[in-house]
Image (cartoon, rainbow, N blue to C red):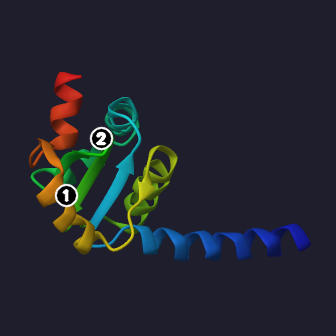
């Protein structure tokens, strides 16, 4: 019984954390392009239903030797949202204050892939 209670407490904590890391406009930092490609590959193999939702809603920038994945207005079911968040946590780091950081990316970063970063990575890398 104690283990079940701890599991429930942990699940509630995890759900709150997942909701905080995926907002209508989110930015995630990948340390390398290879990390981004592995993320895209895992989406393609295991969660292809998420990829169709990404269409024209994501871009990839490079800034200070890190890659920044931008997601715009992604609407997913709670189940798919949880899966996506768990994959993002595995490969990347959430960027705090995404609107402010996006301004910095526009000024100082370089756009690598516009609009369809996930699909482009899957088909070309």
Q: Is residue 22 above or below residue 35?
A: below
What residue sits right under mark 1 in the picture?
Answer: 105
Horizontal arrangement in the rendering, residue 34 relative to residue 6 (left or right) = left
Disc number placed over residue 123 in the picture, else none: none
- Disc with the residue nearer the chain's start (2 vs 1): 2
Residue count near mark 1 (Cα–Cα under 10 Å), binned few <14, some 14–19, many ≥20:
some
Give the CA distance from mark 2 to mark 1.
28 Å
Query: Where does the image place residue 4, in percent across and percent down from the top left?
Result: 81, 70
What residue sits right under mark 2 in the picture?
Answer: 48
**63 or 56: which is nearer to us?**
63
Residue count near mark 2 (Cα–Cα under 10 Å), binned few <14, some 14–19, many ≥20:
few
Query: At numbered mark 1, what does the secondary structure look like: helix, strand or loop?
Result: helix
Quadrant in which the C terminus appears: top left
Q: Does the rendering let one see residue 7?
A: yes
Q: Can you name the residue that lies furthest to the right here?
A: 2
Quadrant in which the N terminus appears: bottom right
Query: Where does the image place residue 112, in percent across and percent down from the top left?
Result: 15, 39
Horizontal arrangement in the rendering, residue 91 relative to residue 12 (left or right) = left
> Does the CB distance between marks 2 and 1 fall below 8 Å?
no
Count of all numbered marks drawn on residues in the image: 2
Q: Is residue 118 above or below residue 57?
A: above
Q: Is residue 45 above or below residue 104?
A: above
Horizontal arrangement in the rendering, residue 79 relative to residue 104 (left or right) = right
Q: Is residue 29 above or below residue 78?
A: above
Residue at the (20%, 47%) spot, across then down: 61
């Amino acid at each position: 019984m104690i283990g079940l209670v701890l599991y429930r407490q942990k699940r509630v904590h995890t759900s709150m954390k997942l909701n905080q890391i995926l907002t209508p406009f989110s930015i995630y930092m990948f340390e390398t392009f290879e990390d981004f490609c592995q993320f895209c590959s895992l989406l393609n193999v295991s969660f292809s239903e998420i990829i169709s939702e990404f269409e024209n809603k994501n871009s990839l920038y490079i800034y200070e030797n890190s890659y920044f994945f931008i997601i715009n207005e992604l609407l997913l079911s709670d189940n798919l949202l949880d899966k996506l968040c768990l994959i993002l946590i595995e490969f990347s780091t959430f960027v705090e204050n995404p609107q402010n950081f996006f301004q910095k990316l526009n000024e100082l970063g370089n756009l690598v892939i516009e609009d369809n970063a996930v699909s482009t990575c899957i088909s070309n890398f």
